[in-house]
Structure formats: C-alpha cells, structure tokens
Image (tube, grey):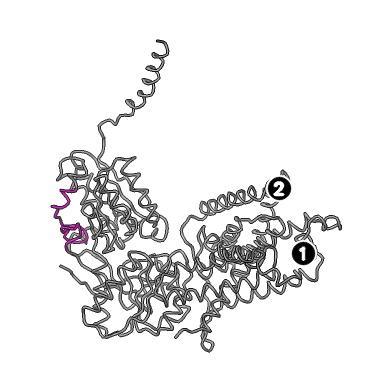
C-alpha cells in the first residue's frame, strides 16, 4: 500500500525547497525582464559558503545560513551591477542577457570547482528522525518547511505592507509609471537581486544538507525551479507558492506512478518539464491571473 | 608558368609539416587506460589508477615489453558513457594505442566495443560487469579481468535463499549494471526454486540525488530484504536517506559498487551500512599473488587496495603480457595473444573464454563493522569466500 500521507509530506518538503529557490528567480525575472540562469550557481555558491562556515569553520548551520544569505546576496547585487545592468543600458536584448547569465553561471560553477574540487561534499550535522503517526519526519525537513513558511509570511508582509514591497510590485508591473511616480527603480531592482540571490543560497544549503554538494548542485534542480517560476507566473510571488507545491506533488506522485509502472524514476525530471511545456502552450501567464493582487 | 610554380611551391609547403610530423620510431610501448576519475565513481577510480601505475612500474622494472619501456596513457571516463567513448577515441586516434585497459563502466564499454572492433584495438575491462556486453556485436574485441553481474546476482540469490527471505525489494541504478545484477538475482531465485515474492523494483536516476519517495515506496511494500546496486556517491545518499526513513530495520544486500571506505565518509551512510547490510558481494583475488599485490600496493600508496584495484592491475599486466606474446605492437596480434593468455593475476588465475569473459574467479561476501582504528570508524570485513569455476 502506498503511504499517501508520506507522499504528500514529501511533496511539501520538495515544494518548500523549490519555493525558496524560485522566489529570487521569479522576482528578478519580473523586474529585470530576463531569466537569470546563473541563479543555479547562486544556489551552489550558497551551499559551498554554508559548507565552509558550518563544516570547515565548524560554526554550525544557523550561522552558515545567515552568512551564505548575505554573501550570496552581495554576489547577486555585484553581478547585476557589474554585468546585467551595464549590458541592459547598452541595449542588450533578453537573448544577450540570458547568454551572459549562462556564461556567468559557467564561470561561477568552475570557480567553485577549482576552489573546493569537484568531489561531492557532505554536511555532517545529524538530524533526529522520528515517526509521527504514518509519517517519517526528520528535523531538517521540518526546518525546511518552517523556512518556507517564514519566507512566505515575510515576503507577504514585505510586498503588502512596506514601501519597498509596494515599490517592487509597482516596478514589476510597470517600470515607466513607477519611475514617473518617483520610485527609485534602480534601488528596487538591486534590493530584489540581493534578496533573491540570498534566498537561492538558503535553498542551496538545504539541498546540500539533505543530499550532497558539488559544483552542479544548483544546476541539478534548476529545471523544476524554472518550472515553478513559469507556472506561478513570472514575477508573481503568490503564484510561485502554489506552483512550488504543484510541482512538488507532481514529482512525488510521479515517482510513485513510475515505480508502479516498473519504469525508471529518471523520468521524474521530465514531469516538471512536461508541466513547464504545457503551461507555456496553454497558459503562458501561469497562475498569475489567480493572484491578481500581486 | 609562374602560377604553376607557385602552385607546386604551395603544395610543397603543405606537405612539409606532414613529413616533419611523420612518427619517429616509438620510444615506448603505450597501454591506454580508461578509469573514471570524476563523477560518481571518482573515489574508486583514483585507487584503481594506482593499481594500474603499480603494474606499469613492475613491468618496466622487469625490463618492459618488446625491449621497450611501457607508458600508461590514462584518461578520465567521468562515470559517463559518452565521455568514456570519447576518451577511447582519443586514445586510439591521437595516442595511437593498440590495447586499452578499460573502460571502467559497462555503459562506456557498450559504446566502445563497436568502435574498438572497427579500429581493431582490444579492450580489457577491469570492472565493466554487465552480462549484456558479451552478447554484443564485436564482443570478441572485449576481454574482462572481472567477473560478470550475472555471477554476482546469483551469489546474492543464494544468500536470500540461505537466509530464507521471502519478500524481496530492489533499488538499483537505472543502467546496464544496476538492472543487470537485479535481473541475474531474480533469475537465480527462480532457478533455485525460491518460494517468495519480488514486492517492488525501483530503478533510480543517479543524477537525481534525492531518493526519499523511492525509499518510501520500498518501505510501503514491506519487504524483508532489499537489494541495492549503486555507485559510491549516489549510494551514500540512498543510505543516508534510508537511515532517516528508518529502513535500517530491514536486511539489505550490497554489491561491488557500494563496497569500500568511500561510502563511510558520510557518517550516517556508514551507520546505516553497519546496521542494515547483511551481505554484499565483490570479486576478490585469493592466494599468495593477491597477498603480494596487497603488500606492494599498501607500501607504495600508504593504504590498502580497495575494490577492483586488483583487476585493474591484472588488466594492465594482461595487456603487457599479450603484447610480449604477440611479438609486435599491433591490435590484431594482441587480441589473438589475449585469447590464449593464461597467468596468475592478483585477482586469481586469469584466462578468457571464447567470449572474452573471465573463465573463473572468486567472490567475497562482505559486511560493514565498526573499527575505531580507521579514519572513518568503519571498515568492510569478509563473511565468506565463494569460488566460481
């Protein structure tokens, strides 16, 4: 018998990871109008900084999350300021920016490989595992779900109740009008890059602690994260929440189905891809229409 | 007239570099080698390369082959079938090698066999164990210093029948190796008249690196024994997550891919293996040649040889002996010499049957125990030796 409670719980874990990873991608995509493929490497970089702080310096995971958030956020801002903004000012199209981001990703990935080698590394922090009714739960998974919840509430508060949040929404939906109303769009954009890259780092650490880290850590999960951003509607945070859990469910139920059919679970990546393609054909604006307030 | 002269001059100019580059009489005899030094098998591949280096050192100390020194041209197959084939092409086309020790994995071997046949260069694998490779077109160019999955699966089937397990699950790599062992195990059980049920089979993607839901399916099928066929780095994640899922209360069966200290570098993976694995298999050498090899390897590299170091050493030695027997550095002659070759290798007596497969050898059944004297706190120990004729 399939333990559906566990499958749904696992989907929540997967979805939480994808949500944290996708927030930065969808918001920067919405504001800067291009998909940043180096977002994958922001996750990888965060995982390695986290590994450096938690394992090599031995300072523990909470501090690792904080340091990785700050450093990756800074790298995100520098990349935007140093590469994407100058290119955009010189009239670069979405294609130019996209290719530049792929190139940046390569540079980051191989620099990480040169600094830490390409061998997989493991976080050694151990988590207690316990049974709760039909569920098997570990401390790490609870932290991951908790992090996604805190993130959702904080982003909701930020977007709805703060000046910068309102400015992000305004700049995203109509940059010219936002500029004309006296919003410092440039500042809004770099703050968004900071938060987005910082959150990518958090996702990278969670992924690393759950599995392993290597220079392709971010790239391993970039496809479902893109699927979340697109299904949720580019630039739409609330859409991303719904999309993250839809993709999480689809992947996990997909695995159950694939095993029942005697097929390889290799196809599970294909499930996210399938959803992505169907979304692009049927409903390119994603779930955005369902969350108009954002 | 001037035009024609210019044309001739230009043609000459084109030819000069060619004649200048014409190969001089080779100073050394090259033996190609494909090992996976990056990717999921990297920890294993690096140790195996030491085995190959040791063989070359000994061959050269004994005077080389055909009166020349042997040069090992090692390439990284990256635990990726396509990369492995690419490196085989490089060895044959650029380095001009006439015999290759490798490829290390079955996926690369499957792609390399037709290519090796076309270019008439024999391959001697040290660890590609998939049964299917012996059924391929061109398999006469493919020799194995290791035993096949077929044998490995049957040894594991005997363990299941001995211990009286009746509900078998499997979680195996979705490739020739993983599915090969699984198939052999199930066939072995059927032929042995086993009265039980295969409750679930999971074929997983090594690149996915998160197997929670896969493991959940195993748990829900309520097996009493689970077969795991993995490599090292993906195996670590499976074991670590299996421990978190509480799957250590079930008996697990390992294989050669998850043998070795590389699996213990993650403490939860080591803990799980110690608690759950009732038996794993691997090919081993036995006898005095093996003991000598272990002593030399340990002295040279500061650690004991691990899995397939002995067969790598033997594959390189087999290549050298075949070149010497052929009397000429040429793939066709070397292949013919290999078919007649017989010698006492580190991994036991080596000769090849009509399909190029190793004619005999032995398996070890192993488990994992705690050992505070080792760096990781764990080590593999032998339960028993099974010799196949």
Q: Position of residue A51 (x, y in %)?
A: 55, 63
Q: In which quarter of the view is residue A280 placed?
A: bottom right
Q: Position of residue A41 (x, y in %)?
A: 58, 57
Q: Which chain is home to disc 2?
A: A
Quarter of the image with the C terminus of chain B in it: bottom left
Residue with the most extreme front position: A282
Residue designated by label 2: A88
Q: Answer with left or right where residue B150 lies relative to residue A293.
A: left
Q: Earlier in the sequence, mark 2 or mark 1?
A: 2
Residue with the most extreme top position: B1
Q: Secondary structure at mark 1?
A: helix
Quarter of the image with the N terminus of chain B in it: top left
Q: Which residues are magenta?
A: B335-359
Q: Answer with left or right where residue A289 lies relative to residue B9.
A: right
Q: Residues within 10 Å of mark 2 (few under 14, many from 20)?
A: some
Q: Nearer the viewer, residue A71 or A145?
A: A145
Q: Secondary structure at mark 2?
A: helix
Residue designated by label 1: A169
- Give how far apart the Cα atoms at labels 2 and 1 are: 21 Å
Q: Position of residue B150 (x, y in %)?
A: 25, 68
**Residue A117 — which label?**
none
Instruction: Residue at 70% x, 66% y: name it.
Output: A236
Q: Residue B218: within the magenta?
A: no
Q: Residues within 10 Å of mark 1 (few under 14, many from 20)?
A: many
Q: Tally the marks.
A: 2
Residue with the most extreme bottom position: A133
Q: Position of residue B99 (x, y in %)?
A: 25, 46
Residue with the most extreme right position: A181
Q: Which chain is home to disc 1?
A: A
């Amino acid at each position: 018998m399939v333990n559906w409670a566990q499958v749904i719980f696992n989907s929540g874990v997967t979805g939480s990871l994808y949500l944290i990873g996708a927030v930065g991608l969808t918001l920067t995509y919405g504001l800067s109008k291009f998909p940043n493929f180096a977002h994958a490497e922001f996750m990888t970089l965060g995982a390695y900084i986290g590994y450096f702080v938690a394992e090599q310096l031995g300072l523990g995971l909470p501090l690792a999350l904080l340091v990785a958030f700050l450093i990756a956020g800074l790298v995100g801002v520098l990349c935007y300021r140093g590469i994407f903004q100058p290119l955009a000012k010189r009239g670069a199209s979405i294609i130019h920016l996209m290719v530049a981001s792929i190139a940046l990703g390569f540079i980051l990935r191989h620099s990480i490989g040169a600094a830490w080698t390409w061998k997989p590394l493991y976080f050694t922090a151990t988590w207690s595992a316990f049974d709760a009714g039909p569920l098997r739960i570990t401390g790490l998974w609870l932290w991951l779900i908790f992090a996604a919840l805190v993130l959702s509430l904080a982003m909701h508060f930020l977007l709805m109740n703060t000046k910068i949040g309102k400015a992000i929404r305004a700049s995203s939906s109509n940059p010219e009008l936002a500029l004309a109303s006296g919003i410092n769009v440039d500042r809004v954009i770099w703050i968004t890059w900071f938060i987005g890259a910082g959150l990518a780092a958090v996702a990278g650490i969670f992924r690393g602690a759950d599995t392993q880290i290597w220079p392709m850590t971010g790239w391993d999960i970039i496809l479902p994260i893109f699927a979340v951003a697109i299904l949720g509607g580019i630039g739409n945070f609330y859409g991303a929440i719904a999309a993250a859990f839809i993709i999480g469910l689809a992947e996990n139920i997909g695995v159950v189905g694939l095993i029942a059919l005697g097929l390889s679970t290799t196809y599970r990546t294909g499930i996210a891809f399938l959803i992505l393609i169907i979304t692009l054909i049927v409903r390119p604006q994603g779930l955005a229409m369902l969350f108009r307030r954002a | 007239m001037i035009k024609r002269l210019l044309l001739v001059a230009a043609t000459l100019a084109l030819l000069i570099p060619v004649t200048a580059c014409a190969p001089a009489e080779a100073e050394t005899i090259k033996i190609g080698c494909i090992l996976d030094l990056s990717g999921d098998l990297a920890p294993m591949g690096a140790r195996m390369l030491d085995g190959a280096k040791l063989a070359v050192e000994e061959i050269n100390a004994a005077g080389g082959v055909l009166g020349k020194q042997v040069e090992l041209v090692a390439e990284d197959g990256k635990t990726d079938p396509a990369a492995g084939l690419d490196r085989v092409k490089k060895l044959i086309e650029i380095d001009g090698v006439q015999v290759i020790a490798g490829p290390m994995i079955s996926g690369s071997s499957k792609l390399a066999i037709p290519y090796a046949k076309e270019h008439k260069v024999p391959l001697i694998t040290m660890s590609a164990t998939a049964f299917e490779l012996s059924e391929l077109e061109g398999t006469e160019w493919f020799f194995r210093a290791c035993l096949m999955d077929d044998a490995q699966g049957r040894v594991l089937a005997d363990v299941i029948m001995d211990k009286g397990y009746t509900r078998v699950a499997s979680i195996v790599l979705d490739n020739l190796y993983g599915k090969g062992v699984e198939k052999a195990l199930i066939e072995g059980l059927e032929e042995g008249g086993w009265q039980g049920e295969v409750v679930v089979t999971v074929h997983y993607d090594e690149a996915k690196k998160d197997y929670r839901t896969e493991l959940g399916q195993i748990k829900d099928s309520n097996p009493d024994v689970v077969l795991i066929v993995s490599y090292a780095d993906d195996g670590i994640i499976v074991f670590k997550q299996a421990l978190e899922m509480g799957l250590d209360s079930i008996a697990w069966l390992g294989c050669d891919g998850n043998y070795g200290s590389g699996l213990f570098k993650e403490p939860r993976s080591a803990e799980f293996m110690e608690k759950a694995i009732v038996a794993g298999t691997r090919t081993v050498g036995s006898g005095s040649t093996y003991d000598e090899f272990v002593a030399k390897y340990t002295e040279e590299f500061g650690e004991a040889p691990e899995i397939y170091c002995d067969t790598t050493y033997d594959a390189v030695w087999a290549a050298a002996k075949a070149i010497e027997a052929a009397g000429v550095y040429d793939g066709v002659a070397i292949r013919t010499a290999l078919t007649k070759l017989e010698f006492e290798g580190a991994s036991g007596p080596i000769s090849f049957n009509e399909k190029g497969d190793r004619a005999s050898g032995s398996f070890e059944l192993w488990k994992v125990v705690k050992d505070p004297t080792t760096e990781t706190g764990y080590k593999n120990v032998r339960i028993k030796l099974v010799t196949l004729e």
